[in-house]
Structure formats: structure tokens, C-alpha cells
Image (spheres, grey):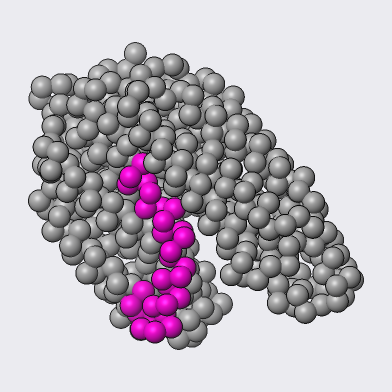
Amino acid sequence: MTLSPARLRILVAALLSVSFLGALDHTVVSTSLATIAGDLGALEHMSWIMVGYTLAATAMLPVLGKLGDVVGPRRVFLLSLVTFLAASLVCGFAPDLGWLIAARVLQGLGSAGLQLMSQTIIARVTSPRQRPRYMAIIGAAFPIAIVVGPVVGGLITDFWGWSWVFWINLPVGVVALALAMVAVPRLPGGAHPRFDVPGAIVFTATLLALVLAVTWAGDDALRPAAIVCAVAVVVGIPVLVVIERRAAEPILPPRILRHRTILVCLGLSLVVGAGLFAIVAYVPTYIQMAYRATATVSGLVPIATVLGMLVSSLLTGWLVSRSGRYRAYPVIGTALGAAGLAAMAVLPVGAPLWVPMIVMALVGIGTGSFTNLIFAVVQSAAARSDLGAVTATTNLVRQVGSTVGTAVVGGIVGFGVAAALPVGLDAATLTPALVRAADPAVQDEIAVVYHDVFAPVFLGLAAVYACGVVIALLLPPGRLSDDTPQPAASAPARQPA
């Protein structure tokens, strides 16, 4: 479907607004966690405020993607936006933690639909050649939210109260909803109207069990529950295979996994999740302990990383839209990421702070060169009726890679630091403030410990990016076309080769 330039601009503005809402919500709330949990009297369970949101956003991706293919992305997008805004309102009025967690689950579900349908709608109204530029614009919401979210969350919590962390979504969301009602076209559903309900249920339950098993594996108190979840995964996978083989239109169509371009893009999405997102959360702690920086100063390193991602993503989207050629960018990007993470592993303990900032900015530039580009490429390889499913699968692989990678990195860091700390220091109570107040000799010793623990982590993630180089080289050469996708009536979905 071809839109006028004016309507396309309004559509991009609406999609960028809601994508920014979903991305900002996650980072804003993280700053307010302690205040929220303290007011509700549930500090020991405050992690579930984030976990419930993330679980819902991850588990519902394939279901929402397939639903968008069946009933059309506009309906799913508008329903997701209304759900997100209603849940935001409820979150602010939450009288206890259980109420808040339930509302956060709904928020996560709505956020997943907004992110996914924004990418799907762009794929339905633009040509493959135009797509990288618009994907990069919408994808800019994530790095911007990482930079401004914690600051905004802190200011709102300090001056307005934590309820406004959620209510601030409402005025922006209502404007975005009005724009979306006007700008988002009535895109038809796919050629396969049936929905795989049994497959959706089993897939969602299995994925939830996998995420919980990985998340809980490092906690001694929750390890029995993690084992139960792992068993559920082992049972759920073969059951899902049987259901999907018999389904007329499975929740994850096997035909999309027979395409080489799609498989390569899924591999690159896994590299982004497991390679970068798994380490960004731990970089500030590493900088505070190894470089003896304050919490504020340590935030400069991840900021440099995401700003590198933002600039690189926008530039790559513009360049690919001009030429249509895309194969070189994932190869160069994964190579830059591997080189940057390998450099982080060998940096000496006493290096100036600007050195890791530049190195991690290089990692961000490399990652940003293909983070959003792969969505445009994977969508160009899929049939029109599978756009939602293939976009959801690409997002899902990234999210699972991030979850598993974060758990693995956290386990290695926690175990390594506890085993290597000098006698008399407890890893469970060691804070950056205590380190800065300690004797210089103790500070030096702790800095060496953190450097020695993180060095193999950086090397391991560099190896992940090196595998990404090999994967990127397998991407078939090609050129994105200028043909805009047509409705199903005039352009039936392609059949898999």
C-alpha cells in the first residue's frame, strides 16, 4: 500500500512516539524501583516489577506477530496502545505490589504489541529500499530511552511521586493514539485466517519456563523452582513440535526458517542480544569498581555505547536506502564489535576513563550498523502474509539471547568476584562507596579482581561477535527493491522455495 509523503510522515511520527513510550517506560521505572517497592512494603520482591513486564513482553511476541498477520497489524497496534495506556493508569493507582505486578504484565503485553506492530506496519507501507531508513528512525527510540530514561525517572520520582512515572505515559499516548487513528491505514490480514491457539498456549508456557529457569538458576533459594521450569521446557519443546506439525497455520511457520536470509538475520539478532545487551547492564559496575568512578561518571560508558548505536543506525539506514545494498554492514559491524570487546578485555587497570568510553562507543557503532537493518532485510525475504511472524521471531531471538546472556554474565561475575575478593570482604555487601572509602591498597586489589573477572567475559562476548562475522558472511548478496508491497488481493503471498 502506497501512502502520500505527508501521511507517511505522520505515520512515522506516531510510530516513533509509541515506540519511545514503550522503551522509555522500562528505563524510567528502573530508577524508581526502590521507592515504589518501599512505599508498597515489598522490597524483597521489587524485581518482579521489572520481571513481570519483561516476561509478558517476551512471551507474547510470537502470538502478537501471528495475530497481526491474521487480523491485520492496525487492529493489534491500536489494541496494544489502548492496553498500554490503561495499564499505565492502573499502575499509578496500585495499592499493593500484587496489583502493580499484574498491571505491569499488561503494560509489557501492550509494549510488545507496539514495538512489533510498528515494525510490521512500516514493512507493509514502504518498499524494501525505503524500509532501512524508517526502521532506523523508529529504532532510535531505544538508545534515546536508555540515555534519558534514568534521569527522567529520578526527576519524576523526586518531585512528583512515583505514580507519575506511569501516568506521564497518558498525555503522550493519547496524542499518539489520535495520530495513529488518522495515519495508520486499514491493512488487511493475511491469506491464512486460522489462528493456532494450542500452539500459542504451549509456546508461551514453554518460553516463560525457559526465561524463569535461566533467571532463577543463580539463586540458591529459587533453584528448585528453576529445575522445575527446566523440566517443563524439556517436556514443552517436543509437545510444541508435535502441535506445530499438525497445525494448519502454526504460530511459528516452518517455511520462514527455510530461507537462508532469514536464518542469517536471526543469527545476527542473537549476536545483538547475547553480545551487547548482556554486558551493557554490568559495564557501570565494572567501571565503578575497576576505575573507582562514581555512579554518575560510570554512566558515561554505556551512554557512549548507545550514542554510537544511534548514530550508526541512522547513518546505515540512510546509506542502505540510497543504494539498496546491505551485505557489507553486518560484516563490518560484527567485526568492529568483536575488536572493541577484545580491546576491553586487555585494557590495563589504570587506563583513563575516556579509553573504555571510546572502545565501547566503537562496539556501539558496530552493533548499530546492523541492529535495525536486519529487520528490513528479514522482512524483504518473507512473504507478505508472514511479516508479523518473521518480525516477531527476530525480536524474540534477540530478547531470549539477551535474557540468557545476561544471566550467564551475571553468574560468572558474581561467582568470580566472590571467589577472588581478599579475606574480610563480602561480595554481598561490597558497594562502590565502600571501595572508594577503603585504603588505596585495598582499592587497587579490588580493581584487579574486577578486571580479572571481567576480562574473560569481554573475550567471550568478543567471540560471540566473531561468530557473528562468520554468520554475516553467509548472508546472500542482494539489493533491496523499490517495489512497495501490495494488498493480498493483488499480490498473493509468495510460496517458499
Can residue 324 be seen at all in this image of the molecule?
yes
Q: Position of residue 306 (x, y in %)?
A: 50, 51
Task: Say how many tags the image has.
Answer: 0
Nearer to us in this view, 484 or 360: 360
Q: Position of residue 54 (x, y in %)?
A: 44, 58
What's the residue at 60%, 35% (across, down)? Answer: 336
What's the residue at 20%, 58% (across, down)? Answer: 176
Q: Is residue 380 magenta?
A: no
Q: Position of residue 5 (x, y in %)?
A: 14, 38
Task: Specify start and end residues of the magenta stretch as a single range.
Answer: 136-165
Look at the image and tell me in which quarter the C terminus lies.
top left
Q: Is residue 359 left or right of residue 15?
A: right
Q: Determine which quarter of the picture holds residue 82.
A: bottom left
What's the residue at 66%, 55% (across, down)? Answer: 354
Q: Residue furthest top?
A: 497
Q: Determine which quarter of the picture holds residue 27.
A: bottom left
Look at the image and tell me in which quarter the N terminus lies.
top left
Q: Is residue 150 magenta?
A: yes
In the displayed structure, would residue 62 be above or below residue 209? above
Q: Is residue 410 left or right of residue 371?
A: right
Can residue 65 be seen at all in this image of the molecule?
no
Q: Main secondary structure of the magenta part?
A: helix
Nearer to us in this view, 385 or 360: 360
Nearer to us in this view, 107 or 153: 153
Q: Position of residue 451 (x, y in %)?
A: 78, 55
What's the residue at 42%, 72% (across, down)? Answer: 153
